[in-house]
Structure formats: structure tokens, C-alpha cells
Amino acid sequence: MADVEQRPNARAAMRLHELANSLGVAAAVQAAAQLGIADSLGEQPVPVADLARAVGADEGVLHRLMRALAHHGVFRDAGQHRYAHTELSRLLRTDAPGSRRDMVLLAGMPWAWEVWPRLGDAVRTGKAVFPAIYGKDQFRYLSEDAPDAAAVFNRAMTNGSVITGRAVADTLDVADVRTVADIGGGHGLVLRHLLERHQRLSGVLMDLPSVVAGAEAALRPGGGLAGRCRIVGGDCRAEVPFVADLYLLKHVLHMWDDDQAAAALSAIARSAPSGARVVVVEQLVDASPEPGIAAVIDLLMLLNMGGKERTRDDFAALFERCGLRPAGVTATPSMVHLIEAVVR
Ligand SMILES: C[S@@+](CC[C@H](N)C(=O)[O-])C[C@H]1O[C@@H](n2cnc3c(N)ncnc32)[C@H](O)[C@@H]1O
């Protein structure tokens, strides 16, 4: 009996081996995105030789890459050295609605990749590792040193918001709202959805100056929605210099530890009228329909910015600390929840 207990379980050992090498799967998906393989495939299966010519790759090695990807449902082996699209690989197309290509490229950029081997350090110290590697925080690095990476980041955020942004617009009750402010709203995709859907709404888009400079054309001066939209560049942890009925923070607070997140919520509480609504849009780490990815993003937030994914109770405590009254949590048809509070 003792002998059986000591014998390694072959399946468990293999699973651990697979997990330890899963960075290879991530790298394979990123290589596919970098090479633009998905854009070279149409509706019909394509021979690897043709794909190799189209993307400028070594045919034999491309075949090995496609085989590795097909094991994970990214492309399909159609036999006779041909590959076809799957639901997953179509999302790597540049022109796919809700394309994930930039999100994949983002995950594989050196600055995003290099933090992972230092996870053990971050677990020991409880602190981000990005500033130690780059000498500044992630957003200063992107705006000051890496404009190309910043462009990928901002496009990835916008594309990532195609599904969640629509889910927010579908779920958020704005019946009594005249002005909605999207704080850390990136290029303003979610705000544009809301303004297009509700003709009587006005909006404010706030983000860092370098980010709002690239705001959606419809929101910028001269754009179709410009008359109903104000654009503000600034640090929302220092000041929120306008008044709205509803303040949206989508995937913003999770970048920060509790002190930084509280600084942003307190800045809103200082300028907002009593009764204004604050709606945080994030995945709840204790109630996510996708708990695996929520747990991984939680670690990535720690590594990059010292941030974290939060539970319902974490948000309630944060709201109370900033003079906001917790006002309920609503699920959406995507992985994010609307976590709401009211300014006292
Ligand atoms: C994870 S992205 C989310 C973007 C957008 N809300 C979305 O869901 O697609 C976080 C956003 O916060 C912005 N941001 C970072 N620091 C900020 C600050 N101090 N004040 C205002 N915005 C900030 C970033 O530029 C970025 O657009």
C-alpha cells in the first residue's frame, strides 16, 4: 500500500508538466498573432506551403506551430497539410468583430511578459515588480518610452471592450441620468455606445492626457457626438474636475492597491453631488463566470501596478472608506459585474 502511495501519479505529473510549460502555448498564440496567420486564412482550408509563403515563414516550422495551436483549438488540422479557421483563430483576424489580436499581442510584448518570472518576488514582498524593472510605473513607461506599445495597449483595451462595453450599455440603467462620466475610459468606446443609444445623455471622457489625445473620432471636436461630449485629460486620483450624475470606472480600480483606488473614489466623492451614482465595472474575483482568468488577471495586476481583482466585500469596504454608500451588484451578459455605490 505504501508503495502505491509513493508511486507518482502519471496523470498528475503530466498535468503539472503541461502547466509548467503552458507559457509555450501562450507564445504559440502570440507567434500566430505576430505573423498574421489568421489574416491569411479565408473560409477554405489552406495548405501550409501557401500560408508559409503568405506570412514569410519556414514551411516546416510553420507546420509545427500550426500543429501545436490546433491542439488547443486555435486553427484546425484539415488533413493533407492544410489548416482551417476555428472560432478561436478567427478572433486573431485583424478585421474580426471584437478582434482579440491586439490583446494577444499585448500579453506577449516584452514589457508585459517580463514581469511573470518575478511573481515569486511579488508574492514575497506584496508589491508590483514593473517599477523595479523599468524605473517608473506602467503608464508613465507607456506614454514616455513606448508609444508603439501604448498604441497596442490602447487598441487592445478598446477591442476588449467591444463585448463588455455592449454588455454594460445593455445592463446599465440610465433612465434618470443626464451626464455620464467615464473615468479611465480609454479612447471612449463605452461612452460612445452609451451616447449613441441614449440621445438625451451627455458624456465626459476622462483619461490620461496622452490617451484622450487618441479618443474616438466621434467624440472629438468635429465628431458626430462632440456636442454632447467633453474630453478631460488628467489623473483621476488627484482630481475629478467636473460634475456628473453617474461616474463609470471600467477596469480602472483593479490596476491599483486600496490606497490608490480610494484616492480615485475619494476624488469623485469630493466633486460629485450627493446622490450621484458611481458604477465600477470589473470582474468579481469571488463571483466571476470565468474564475480561472480572473485569478490570473489578479496576479498580473499585482505584478504591473500593485493592483488586484476584488470581491464584493472588498468593494463595499472601499466604498465605505471613501464616503460612498454601497448600492448593489448587477451581473451582465459578460464576465464583468456592475458594482454600484451612491455619493452620500
Ligand atoms: C485597463 S484600462 C481600461 C480602459 C477602459 N475603461 C476599458 O475598459 O476599456 C485602464 C485605463 O485607465 C487609464 N488610467 C491609468 N491611470 C490613470 C489615471 N491616473 N487617471 C485617469 N486614467 C488613468 C489608462 O490610460 C487606461 O485607459
Image: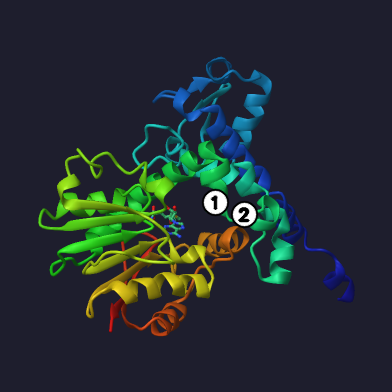
Q: Which residue is mark 2?
A: 136
The span from disc 1 to disc 2 (Cα, nearest Å) is 6 Å
Residue at 51% x, 66% y: name it.
Answer: 256
Q: Is residue 228 left or right of residue 292?
A: left
User: Are the residues tagged 1 and 2 within 8 Å (C-beta)?
Assistant: yes
Secondary structure, mark 1, is: helix
Looking at the image, residue 153 lies above or below residue 181 = above
Q: Residues within 10 Å of mark 1 (few under 14, many from 20)?
A: some
Which quarter of the image is occupied by the C terminus?
bottom left
Residue at 19% x, 63% y: name it.
Answer: 179
Q: Is mark 2 within 8 Å of ligand 1?
A: no
Secondary structure, mark 2, is: loop
Q: Quadrant of residue 80?
A: top right
Q: Quadrant of residue 343?
A: bottom left
Residue at 23% x, 66% y: name it.
Answer: 244
Q: Residues within 10 Å of mark 2 (few under 14, many from 20)?
A: few
**Residue 341 in the image: x percent, y percent?**
31, 77
Amino acid at pointer 2: Lys
Amino acid at pointer 1: Arg
Which quarter of the image is occupied by the N terminus?
bottom right
Looking at the image, residue 344 lies above or below residue 94 = below
Q: Which residue is mark 1?
A: 140
**Residue 27 in the image: x percent, y percent?**
63, 40
On the question of residue 243 being in view, the answer is: yes
